[in-house]
């Protein structure tokens, strides 16, 4: 109970801290004006293509799941993604990352640990892909520096975030590969750590760990690896396209390539485990718009509120419809995710 209270305190502190910096020095009259000053055609288009990343993620997931079960239904993969993001938008702690694989495992009769393993791989490749695109943007600086004027401090911060991201990817990748190729050694270490626990509990954890390692089978096939890597770029280039169209809705026109650092920052903000991604996502979105493109802070705040609201409403509407059709309670999934987390 004490651990839970500390965790919630930290989450609330992060949420309100980021919101303070997001709303600081904002003129609300200007923000409200910008909220409605939008190209209606592009606005409707944005609403229509919001679920696009759920589709590309669902297609990509096939290449992780097929080693355990071929022919996993696209609808179930799409539903799991939609439900996972819905829970992320409603509950703190990014519990949707656990709800997503648990939902699919239940629907397809697959091992929970295996599907959880695929989720870890997915996050590794998400970080790697955006770090690669950010690196591409940074090393191309001499080609665009004459007509994309940004302060040196902004680039320094980008380099820092890029290095942190790459370091995280490398560590996670090495860990996952080690887990897979040194399975027996890993399981013996886990068993040693679990010795103080009862035999029943330690055996359940060991079984889950073994299933998790099996979820990393994907590393065994180089062709599968390359296909998954290719689809990871498809996922994120589609997300960048989504934000590019969103800028058009506010009559902001710029080359598609210039959105790489901005979307990288939105990924950083979205990864912070605040309720509904509130705070972290907002702050980093605003930071990207104001620091890279010199967009007025009031416009940046208005745009960020709009894009977050669209994503939240559309995603949650899809998620709720799926759960309603399946007769599953959102709170039941949240409870399952918390139990798996513990």
Image (tube, rainbow, N blue to C red):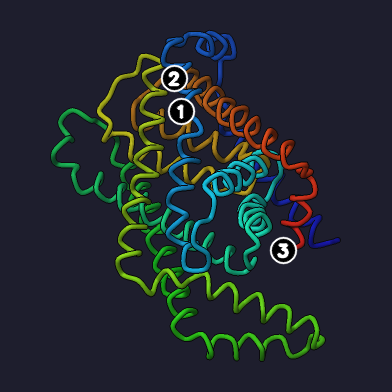
Give x and y (percent) for residue 47: 51, 23
Left or right of 296 in this view: 2: right
Location of residue 71 with respect to 268 vertically, above or below: below
User: Of circles 3 and 1, which is in front?
Assistant: 1
Location of residue 131 with respect to 308 vertically, above or below: below
Which residue lies most toward the front here?
A: 71
| Viewport quadrant of the N terminus | bottom right
Q: Residue at x 73, y 42 (%)?
A: 326
Q: Residues within 10 Å of mark 1 (few under 14, many from 20)?
A: some
Dot 1: what SS? Answer: helix
Whether residue 165 is visible here, answered yes or no, is yes
Q: Which mark is drawn over residue 49?
A: 1
Left or right of 102 in this view: 51: left
Q: Which quadrant of the figure has residue 4?
A: bottom right
Q: Residue at x 59, y 26 (%)?
A: 309
Q: Residues within 10 Å of mark 2 (few under 14, many from 20)?
A: some
Give x and y (percent) for residue 293: 34, 27
Location of residue 34 with respect to 268 vertically, above or below: above
Distance from disc 3 to disc 1, alpha carbons, whole Å, reads 32 Å
Mark closest to the chain's N terminus, 3 or 2 = 2
Determine whether label 2 and label 1 are within 8 Å by CB.
yes
Q: Viewer-proximal residue, 325 or 11? A: 325
Whether residue 17 is visible here, answered yes or no, is no
Residue at image mark 2? 45
Q: Which quadrant of the figure has residue 323?
A: top right
Give x and y (percent) for residue 126: 43, 53
Residue at image mark 3? 340
Location of residue 89 with respect to 44 vertically, above or below: below
Q: Residue at x 30, y 20 (%)?
A: 253
């Amino acid at each position: 109970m004490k651990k839970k209270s500390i965790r919630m305190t930290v989450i609330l502190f992060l949420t309100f801290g980021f919101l303070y910096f997001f709303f600081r020095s904002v003129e609300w009259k200007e923000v409200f004006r910008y909220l409605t000053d939008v190209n209606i055609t592009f606005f409707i288009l944005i609403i229509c293509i919001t679920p696009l990343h759920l589709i590309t993620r669902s297609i990509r997931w096939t290449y992780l799941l097929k080693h355990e079960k071929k022919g996993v239904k696209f609808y179930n993969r799409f539903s799991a993604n939609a439900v996972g993001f819905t829970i992320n938008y409603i509950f703190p702690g990014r519990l949707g990352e656990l709800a997503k694989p648990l939902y699919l495992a239940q629907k397809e009769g697959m091992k929970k640990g295996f599907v959880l393993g695929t989720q870890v791989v997915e996050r590794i490749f998400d970080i790697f892909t955006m770090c690669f695109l950010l690196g591409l943007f940074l090393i191309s600086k001499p080609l665009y520096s004459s007509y994309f004027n940004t302060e040196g401090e902004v680039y320094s911060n980008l380099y820092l975030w890029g290095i942190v991201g790459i370091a995280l990817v490398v560590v996670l990748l090495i860990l996952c590969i080690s887990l897979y190729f040194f399975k027996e050694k890993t399981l013996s270490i886990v068993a040693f750590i679990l010795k103080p626990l009862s035999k029943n509990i330690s055996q359940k954890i060991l079984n889950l760990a073994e299933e998790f390692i099996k979820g990393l089978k994907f590393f065994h096939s180089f062709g599968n690896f390359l296909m998954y890597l290719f689809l990871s770029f498809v996922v994120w280039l589609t997300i960048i396209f989504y934000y590019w169209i969103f800028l058009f809705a506010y009559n902001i026109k710029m080359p598609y390539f210039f959105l790489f650092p901005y979307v990288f920052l939105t990924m950083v903000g979205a990864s912070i485990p605040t309720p509904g991604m509130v705070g972290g996502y907002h702050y980093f979105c605003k930071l990207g718009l104001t620091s890279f493109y010199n967009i007025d802070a009031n416009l940046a705040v208005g745009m960020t509120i709009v894009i977050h609201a669209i994503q939240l409403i559309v995603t949650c509407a899809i998620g709720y419809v799926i759960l309603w059709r399946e007769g599953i309670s959102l709170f039941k999934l949240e409870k399952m995710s918390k139990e798996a987390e513990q």
